[in-house]
């Protein structure tokens, strides 16, 4: 996917109902079932479904944390926060895994930005409120992303999504959106000792 791919990534997600909020996490390596355990999901809540079905539980900022998790591409797992505030990416990045977390909402903050984690540590931030791109800077340079050239939040979102497609080897497309993944609830206070 080349050319206009950078311009349609966010359109594909927002057309599926994420216009008010999106929180996505890309995790290098790892079995989705094992990563779900790391996230302390309730295994009894598991439902195999497509995104359209998962979106029945879409409720941004709810007290109920619900995730949709599964293979993104060979060697990568993707997690979308369907309901709740989002997941804590640090533990997912342990054992030298790379994790990218992208968050957007239609409130005052708009695009929160892209956060890069590695081996349990935040390794870089990019976005309006970030002044520490850290290890993201060479990734931007390698993949032709000029982080200081964004005209608006949507352009910035598309650029980050396009970057993640280049890094993982898989862009968001209709096939990706139609795939079946696992929907789980995360019990209340599951992260009380970490977050």
Image: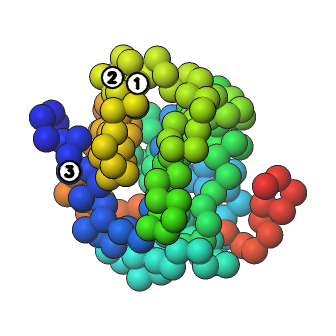
Q: Where is residue 99? Give x, y as percent.
A: 56, 38
Q: Which residue is mark 2?
A: 143
Residue found at x 69% / y 42%: 90
The answer to whether the residues at label 1 and label 2 have Cβ atoms under 8 Å apart is yes
Q: Which residue is mark 3?
A: 8
> Residue 43 vs residue 17: left or right?
right
Label of residue 140 in the image: 1
> Residue 114 vs residue 194: left or right?
left
Residue found at x 61% / y 79%: 62
Crowd band around label 1 with a 10 angstrom C-alpha radius: few (<14), some (14–19), many (20+): some
SS for callout 2: loop
Which of the two discs, 2 and 3, labels the residue nearer the N terminus? 3
Up-down: is 124 above or below 176? above
CA gap between label 2 and label 3 equals: 17 Å
SS for callout 3: helix
> Residue 1 vs residue 147: left or right?
left
Q: How is the image coloured?
A: rainbow
Looking at the image, can residue 169 be seen?
Answer: yes
Residue found at x 13% / y 41%: 4
Q: Quadrant of residue 75?
A: top left
Label of residue 13 in the image: none
């Amino acid at each position: 996917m080349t050319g206009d791919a950078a311009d349609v990534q966010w359109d594909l997600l927002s057309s599926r109902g994420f216009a008010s909020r999106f929180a996505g996490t890309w995790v290098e390596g790892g079995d989705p079932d094992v990563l779900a355990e790391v996230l302390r999901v309730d295994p009894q809540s598991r439902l195999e479904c497509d995104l359209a079905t998962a979106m029945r539980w879409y409720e941004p900022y709810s007290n109920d944390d619900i995730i949709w998790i599964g293979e993104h591409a060979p060697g990568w797992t993707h997690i979308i926060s369907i309901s709740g505030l989002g997941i804590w990416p640090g533990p997912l990045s342990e054992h030298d895994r790379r994790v990218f977390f992208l968050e957007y909402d239609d409130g005052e903050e708009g695009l929160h930005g892209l956060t890069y984690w590695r081996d349990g540590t935040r390794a870089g931030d990019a976005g309006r409120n970030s002044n520490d791109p850290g290890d993201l800077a060479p990734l931007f340079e390698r993949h032709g992303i000029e982080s200081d050239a964004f005209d608006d939040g949507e352009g910035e979102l598309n650029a980050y999504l396009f970057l993640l497609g280049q890094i993982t080897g898989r862009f968001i497309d209709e096939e990706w959106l139609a795939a079946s993944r696992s929907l789980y609830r995360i019990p209340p206070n599951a992260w009380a000792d970490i977050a």
